Amino acid sequence: MKKKLKQLFNNLCCSVCRHGFDEDSIEIKREEAGLLVVHLTCQHCGKSFGAAFLGLTNIELKNPEDMELEVCEGPEAINYDDVIDAHRFIQNLDSDWQKYLPK
C-alpha cells in the first residue's frame, strides 16, 4: 500500500529541504473502506506535514504517471496591487460581509 501511496507524492518535495518523499515518508494512521488517514514526514530533515485524509475508492495504479500530483500554476501571478486591493476590500467589510459569499 505504501508503494502505491508513494506514487501520489512522486513529483512533490519537502518545502524545507527540497528532498523528495519516499515510502518511509508516509505513515498510515488509519485505514477504512474508501478512507485512509496518513501522516507525511520528510525523512531527510524531519519536517512534519501533518495528517491527510485521502478518500480512495480504488488505488490500483494502472499507469502511475496518471496518479501523480502536480503543482499547477495559475494564469497570472498575484502582484503587489492585487494584494493591496484584497487588503482594502477585507479591511472595509462590515456586518453584512456574507453577501459576498456565493449562494
Image: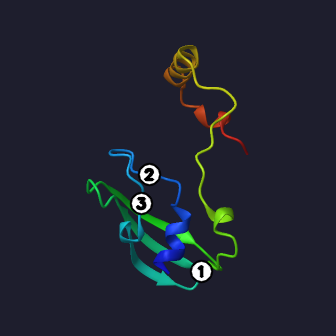
Image quadrant where residue 29 sits: bottom left
Disc 3 to disc 1: CB gap under 8 Å? no
Q: Is label 1 or label 2 in front? A: 2
Q: Considering only order in the chain, which callout, 2 or 3, is on the residue closer to the N terminus?
A: 2
The x and y percentages for residue 19 are 38, 51
The x and y percentages for residue 28 are 41, 76
Q: Secondary structure at mark 3?
A: loop
**What amino acid is found at the position of numbered circle 2 in the picture?**
Cys
Q: Residue at x 36, y 70 (%)?
A: 24
The x and y percentages for residue 23 are 41, 71
Q: Considering only order in the chain, which callout, 1 or 3, is on the residue closer to the N terminus?
A: 3
**Residue count near mark 2 (Cα–Cα under 10 Å), binned few <14, some 14–19, many ≥20:** some
Q: CA distance from mark 3 to mark 2?
A: 6 Å
Q: Residue at x 51, y 61 (%)?
A: 9
**What amino acid is found at the position of numbered circle 1 in the picture?**
Gly
**Residue count near mark 3 (Cα–Cα under 10 Å), binned few <14, some 14–19, many ≥20:** many
Circle 2 residue: 13
The x and y percentages for residue 15 are 39, 45
Which residue appears farthest toward the left when viewing the image? 46
Q: Nearer the viewer, residue 41 or 97?
A: 41
Left or right: 21 as drawn, with respect to 5: left
Q: Secondary structure at mark 2?
A: loop
Left or right: 6 as drawn, with respect to 73: left
* Numbered label attached to residue 21: 3
Disc 3 to disc 2: CB gap under 8 Å? yes
Left or right: 44 as drawn, with respect to 52: left
Circle 1 residue: 34
